[in-house]
Image (tube, coloured by chain):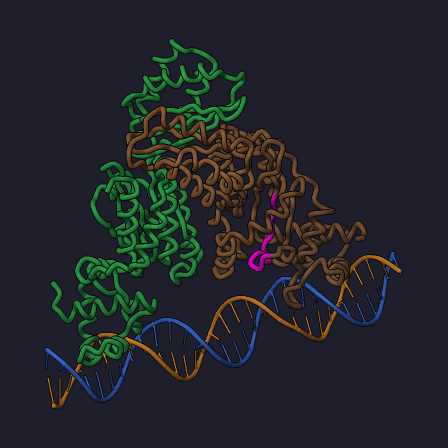
Chain colours: A green, B brown, C orange, D blue
Amino acid sequence: MLDLRKRQILQAVVEDYIATAEPVGSRTLARKWGFGVSPATIRNEMADLEDAGYLDQPHTSAGRIPSDKGYRYYVDQLLEPEPPRPEEIKRIEADLGARREMMQLAQAAARLMAELSPYAALAVVPGLSPSRLRRIHLLPVDESHLLLVLVAEPGIVETRLLELGNPAGQGERERWMEALNQELAGLTATEFDATALATIRGELGTNLYVQVMDALHEVLSDAGEERLLMEGVANLLRQPEFQDSQRLMTLLQSLTGGSEVVEELRGKSRQPGVTVSIGRENATEAMRCCTLVTAAYRAGGEVVGMVGVVGPTRMEYRRVLSLVNEVASELSRALGGA
Amino acid sequence: MLDLRKRQILQAVVEDYIATAEPVGSRTLARKWGFGVSPATIRNEMADLEDAGYLDQPHTSAGRIPSDKGYRYYVDQLLEPEPPRPEEIKRIEADLGARREMMQLAQAAARLMAELSPYAALAVVPGLSPSRLRRIHLLPVDESHLLLVLVAEPGIVETRLLELGNPAGQGERERWMEALNQELAGLTATEFDATALATIRGELGTNLYVQVMDALHEVLSDAGEERLLMEGVANLLRQPEFQDSQRLMTLLQSLTGGSEVVEELRGKSRQPGVTVSIGRENATEAMRCCTLVTAAYRAGGEVVGMVGVVGPTRMEYRRVLSLVNEVASELSRALGGA
DNA sequence: CCTTAGCACTCACTAGCTCAGAGTGCTAAA
DNA sequence: TTTAGCACTCTGAGCTAGTGAGTGCTAAGG
């Protein structure tokens, strides 16, 4: 446990470094924060903090920067939550208020976070596979096309166009719809995909039937997996730690590459509230120099996905924690799952 | 008109510079391409090409690099089209073959181009406003939600969730749908938006009606405008001309900013075939250091949008021209508008 | 008249050097 | 325990000289 003055100094170093991106020296600290002690005293304290692993020194004659452990302590012990900003809340409610399907809302949430923070924003959207199917619609589009609309449990909507060889009549279409909907009652998408082929084929082994089943199968493989949305990559270019384009590239690659990161995010998503992963705490190699702030969102009472912000470990934790928290809450509310 | 040897030398400079990103000297040229003349002769020719504006010299004692005019000449006069690569065509057909709505297809097209080229890819997706509405569906989702599905002329599908205060019955829903569809017959989205309010309100001034109209109005303002999709930004980080993160940032900003660029693209989209805008030929300030290769795609016989690739002026024109061309054709085919 | 060898010249880039400045750790005194 | 003083360390900026790639020009040769 750190004593009061050490905590104050650690906090000062973290906040100064977050603001300036420059290593913080004892003199600067004494001047800006005036603890009522001399730089020499602060130096001693900083040396102790370094020994304890909370601070790093890039080189002998530079100031100190917070280590991952230092940021961790700051986030867990020193950070008092930011009071909500009315205009920000208003903006979030406006953007996520419009009733849209999950995909659209998640996209809007990511855009929002990218706009309201100087970092990149992520959103994980649930895949179709584990969700219960609610209803399949086959809508006429024109003589030769049907629109397949798949509505699944936590408000997921997927659509697909079908091209028909020979036009199907009204009655025929409705018969198929009926049959399909009978079949899918209460099944998850994966179950349906596995069983439906066998059961329905006997009854309605027609041309259209095959096409619909193919389309369903396609939708499941396209939209079955969770998807990772990303926004505001340009923000990161502004951060001094990403001036080295190499680093940004590896980060982007592992984020667009997808599965590894999504896997990591999935683990977090079970935890309630906002989660912070700082630097080396991240499993993914390319994320070791970054901090990831995430929060799960719910739909229909269930955690279905998460939103988050990625930036350098030198991140404005106060702002970002409250932002991610608000966006996730509002998103949950919009999805009826708060 | 340039004589044969000048053209050969210009071509050699362009292709060498594209490959190496280093200014090309007379000696290198003589060694690699062996024109059967000495470096001194090549120097004379290059000096002429520079006087004529086809080449630039970064500084006195460096080799030459192509100017925008040089690239233009290369593209217009020297470039013989790349023979199609069977495996690439196959990949494009596979990815764009699956029958999906326009938005999904355009997204897939952009992903494809970002993956098959080392540059960033764009796609402009048509907005709803100018397109004729075909049909509105109101689908039951659960007790308190309806899904509004709007199908418009060139295969555009937009969806929106509606939350209902008090659940609507089957018959009621169908009556509204009928009334709406009566009304929209043959109107464009904008016309409908303007007129429908007045005409229908009298007949069916109910609670649900207002919600549906609001949702329609919202869809039109969200999806009314053309949208710009972007993929493969990370690719650009690999290009030496974007090592300076400042330049990439301004480019990204003007691309995500949107309207200015979309405006410029719209102008091009009328032209048939593949269009190339090199460096200063671009109206947008941030694009002055880039080349943009675009091609329009069609749906239902009409040009509705365009796909393209953005990269440094030092671009692999041969590859990219054929890629963009193929993707646009295949996209048109998939949309039934070839 | 075109081509080419030779040569002087230019200019970016690199390595090595010094110097100033910021910051440290240590010691000794208050 | 705090602090003033001091020697020390290390980065980064600025300077210089040297290297090398490439040029333009000139004059000789086909």
Residue B309, position as x, y percentages in the image: 56, 46
Hey, which residue is sitting farthest top in the picture?
A202
Residue B40 seen? no
- Name the image quarter holding residue A265: top left
Which residue lies at the image location 62% right of the left edge and 35% below the top edge? B302
B71 relative to B332 in the view: left or right? right
Residue B99, position as x, y percentages in the image: 50, 28
Image: B5 above or below B142: below
Does residue B320 show up magenta in the picture? no
A194 relative to A49 in the view: left or right? right
Which residue lies at the image location 28% right of the left edge and 49% below the top edge? A294
Does residue B286 show up magenta in the picture? yes
* Camera-side residue of B318 and A123: A123
Hey, which residue is sitting farthest front in the picture?
B202
Which residue lies at the image location 62% right of the left edge and 39% below the top edge? B322
A35 relative to A307 in the view: left or right? left
* Camera-side residue of B309 and B243: B309
* Camera-side residue of B235 and B288: B288
Q: Quadrant of the C terminus of chain B?
A: top right
Q: How many marks?
A: 0
Residue B310, position as x, y percentages in the image: 56, 49
Residue B14, position as x, y percentages in the image: 66, 52
Q: Which residues are magenta?
A: B284-294
* Camera-side residue of A77 and B139: B139
Which residue lies at the image location 38% right of the left edge and 9% below the top edge? A202
Image: B83 above or below A167: below
Residue B298 seen? yes
